[in-house]
Amino acid sequence: MNSQTALQYVNESGIVAGMRGAFPPDVALQVTSVLMGEGINCFEFMMNSEEPIEAMQAVKAEYGDEACVGMGTVLDVPTAEKVMDDGADFIVSPAFQTDVVKAVLACDVLMGPGVATPSEAVHAWEMGVKLLKVFPIGALGIDYFKAMFGPLGHMTFMCNGAMTDQNAREFIQAGAIACGMGGWLVGDGTWSDSKLRSRARILVNTIDSVREGHDPTREI
């Protein structure tokens, strides 16, 4: 999957489900099965988790091009190269590291570096980044994002960090194309299918309600 295709998945979904912690392949397949059934098809695994590469590959093998499956918490070039070799559709980091960005962009893989300031956002955008992960924006708040987005509205932002259904609504309304959803959506790897399904339905309905009545995605 090339970078533009992956970006389109994220843009159309509005939700990237992130699994950090106890999400080995069997749990990952259980969680993604429920979420796919509710219309969520973008998944981010994390390098600081249990068997993350194996989990990523299991989900990719199960769903193929029906899902967009990537890796987060990628903090150096060797790790980025490994997960790309292992099939990641996108790479996400909590930080903005130019060497990692260059390595990923050179392979035409979607890169979402973490940015927290306008200066970082502009620098990353000038390098060719097409998805800016604003992190940890949940802690900074909606007013911070609105102030940052105002002069940078031509850029493409995904909001991550302490996301819930309520602030996800606010960030999408304010201009983000997607929100990265972790614990609020998928829990800690022990949740029942019914609880996962309930959270997924709440979130999908929330995003759909924001987008209702107008083009659901931005042109990217």
Image: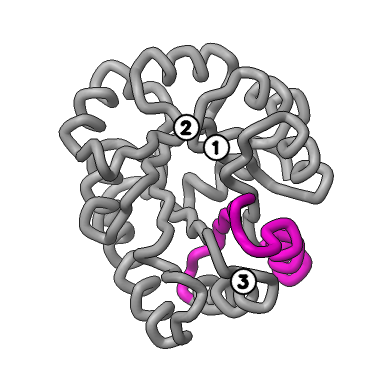
Disc 1 crowd rating (10 Å Cα; few below 14, some 14-19, many 20+) is many
Residue projecting furthest to the right: 85
The kind of secondary structure element at disc 2 is: strand
Q: Which mark is residue 28?
A: 3
Question: Which portion, as a residue range, is magenta?
Answer: 38-66
Q: What residue lies at 73% left-to-right and 62% top-to-bottom?
A: 60
Residue 29, x across and y down, in percent: 64, 75
The Cα atoms of the two marked residues, 1 and 2, are separated by 6 Å
The residue nearer to you, when weighing 108 against 96, is 96
The kind of secondary structure element at disc 3 is: helix
Disc 3 crowd rating (10 Å Cα; few below 14, some 14-19, many 20+) is many
The residue beneath circle 2 is 114
| Mark 1–mark 2 CB contact (< 8 Å) | yes
Q: What residue lies at 75% left-to-right and 63% top-to-bottom?
A: 54
Whether 11 is drawn above or below 59: the answer is: above
The residue beneath circle 1 is 93
The kind of secondary structure element at disc 1 is: loop
